[in-house]
Amino acid sequence: MNEIQNINGENRMVQTIPSYEVAEMMEREHAKVLKMLEGETYKDGRTKVVGIIPVLTNASSRVSDYFIESSYKDKSGKTNKCYECTKMGCELLANKMTGEKGILFTAKYVKRFNEMEQQKVPTTYKEALQQLLAQVEENEKLQIENQQQTQVIEEMTPKADYFDALVDNNLLTSIRDTAKQLHIKQTAFTKWLIENNFCYRDVRGRIKPYADKMEYFELKEFTTDWGHSDTQTLITPKGKEAFRLLLSKGLRVKSKKKGLKKRAK
């Protein structure tokens, strides 16, 4: 999570971990972690547990460098108190633990902060706005590219009735044969179909079309000589023409899995 702190007159976002998650890392109840932070007294006012926050306060240390008071809602919807713990705050808590549990807690919070740092979280309002603007522009660009892909298929693909007639004449082709007709290697064509979200590999590694792309494919059942039944993905003439047009235009699309832009060649 990120909390705002005023550092040298500038509001900056500081990476933190909520104390209830810290409690899970420490394998302790959240209430016990709160006692470590706030301390606890007997009814007569004597100190029962020395709290980290009171000690920092008495020493005139800036508590917000370590712990920031906050709240959260539990599963029932009830609002409960917690603290956002900075990396230095977690270090103070780790120093209160000894042995194997202390080592494991240190390993967990260090890993969490390293993961947050790798995510390149913005540290100022300006950086956050720049990141948001870049994301909006990226989304708009993807929307335009998807519209272009749909438009090419709708406007340049011949009428469905014509292709249905060709299908009736058994002009379905396999991915390998289609690749040959399109003058592209089978491996490159298969990769292109997957990256452009027309097909995917099932758990057995077979190429299968997505349900919303079935207008370009047909699944044919077959039985081998030894009685094994399976299905083969075939490409309809409509699909072959659509893929030819898209490949010839080098349409830019976005990969579903990697989130990277690809250009069909």
Image: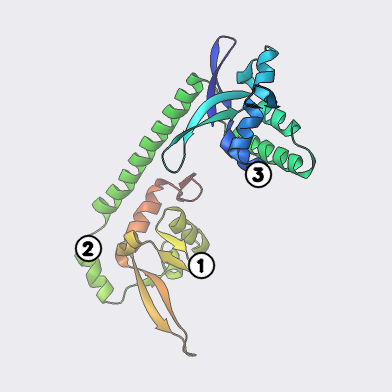
The image's mark for residue 27 is 3
> Which comes before the other along the chain, label 2 or label 1?
2
Residue at the spot 71% in from the left edge and 28% down from the top edge: 92
In the image as oriented, which residue stretches furthest toward the top? 9
Residue 110 on image: x %, y %: 69, 36
Task: Give residue 5's quadrant in the image.
Answer: top right
- Amino acid at circle 1: Val
Q: Residue at x 65, y 21 (%)?
A: 45
Q: How would you rate the neighbour count of disc 1 (Cα within 10 Å): few for under 14, some for 14-19, many for 20 or more? A: few
Q: Residues within 10 Å of mark 2 (few under 14, many from 20)?
A: few
Q: Is residue 43 above or below residue 209?
A: above
Q: Earlier in the sequence, mark 3 or mark 1?
A: 3
The alpha-carbon separation of the residues under discs 3 and 2 comes to 62 Å
> Which sits in the foreground, 107 or 39?
39
* Image-based side of 163 in relation to 119, left or right: left
Q: Residue 136: horizontal and vertical position, in percent? A: 39, 32
**Mark closer to the observer (2, 1):** 1
Instruction: Between residue 240 and residue 218, name the one nearer to us.
Output: 218
- N-terminal label among 3 and 2: 3
Mark 3–mark 1 Cα distance, whole angstroms, equals 37 Å
User: Which residue is identified by label 1?
Assistant: 203
Query: Horizontally, is 103 left or right of 187 in the view?
Result: right
Residue 240 appears in the rendering: yes
